[in-house]
Amino acid sequence: QVQLVESGGGSVHPGGSLGLSCTTHGTSATFHVMAWHRQAPGNQRELVANIDRHGVTHYAESVKGRFTITRDNAQNTIYLQMNRMEPEDTAVYYCSGRFWGTVKDFWGQGTQVTVSS
């Protein structure tokens, strides 16, 4: 059974930094695309950033220049480095993975990130 597990959430002051990790369990196959999403209370889940197995990245406009997504293909792990954080970044952050040629996304359970003074 494929499982994604996020870690690294927590609380930070505005302007601070936080890093998230997402590890994969239950498969030796490499996801084609992995991504970070977030959902704030009362809002729909939104894409934060994604990265394919070749390292091509895409970011939401709201995080460009502040967040960096990276991945380790050998470990099927992705990371999200969040800098210059803002209160609007407060949300539950989820990672996802999709294998090549499929439409099914595997999801982690989410990790809370809170930006507050």
Image (cartoon, grey):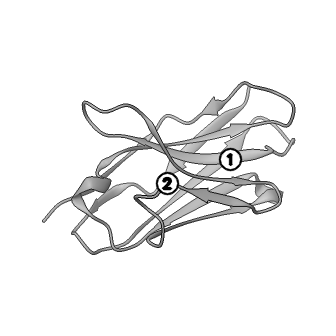
Q: State the image quarter where residue 38 is shown.
A: top left
Q: Residue at x 85, y 37 (%)?
A: 100
**Residue displayed at 84% across by 46% down:** 30
Measured as percent of width and height from the top left, residue 111 is found at: 41, 45
Tell me, for residue 60, which label it has, or none. 2
| Image quadrant where one finds the C terminus | bottom left
Disc 2 is placed on an element classified as: loop
Question: Left or right of 3: which side holds 102?
Answer: right
Q: Quadrant of residue 62?
A: bottom left
Nearest the camera: 74 or 40? 40
Q: In the displayed structure, does residue 69 sit left or right of residue 53?
A: left
Tag 2 and tag 1, C-beta contact below 8 Å: no
Residue under the image location 55 percent in, 36 percent down: 108
Select label 2 or label 1 by which is in front.
2
Q: What distance separates the C-alpha of mark 2 from that of mark 1?
A: 15 Å
Q: Single out the residue that lies furthest toward the front.
A: 61
Residue 115 lies left or right of residue 79; in this view the side is left
Circle 1 residues within 10 Å: few <14, some 14–19, many ≥20: many
Q: Which residue is mark 1?
A: 34
Which residue corresponds to the image point at 79% horizontal and 43% vertical from the top-left? 31
Instruction: Give coordinates of residue 35: x percent, y percent.
Output: 61, 47
Q: Position of residue 47 (x, y in %)?
A: 51, 44
The quadrant of the image that shows the N terminus is top right
Classify residue 106 by image quadrant. top right
- Could you say whether the residue bearing mark 1 is in a helix, strand or loop? strand
Badge 2 crowding class, 10 Å Cα cut-off, few under 14, some 14 to 19, many 20 or more, is few
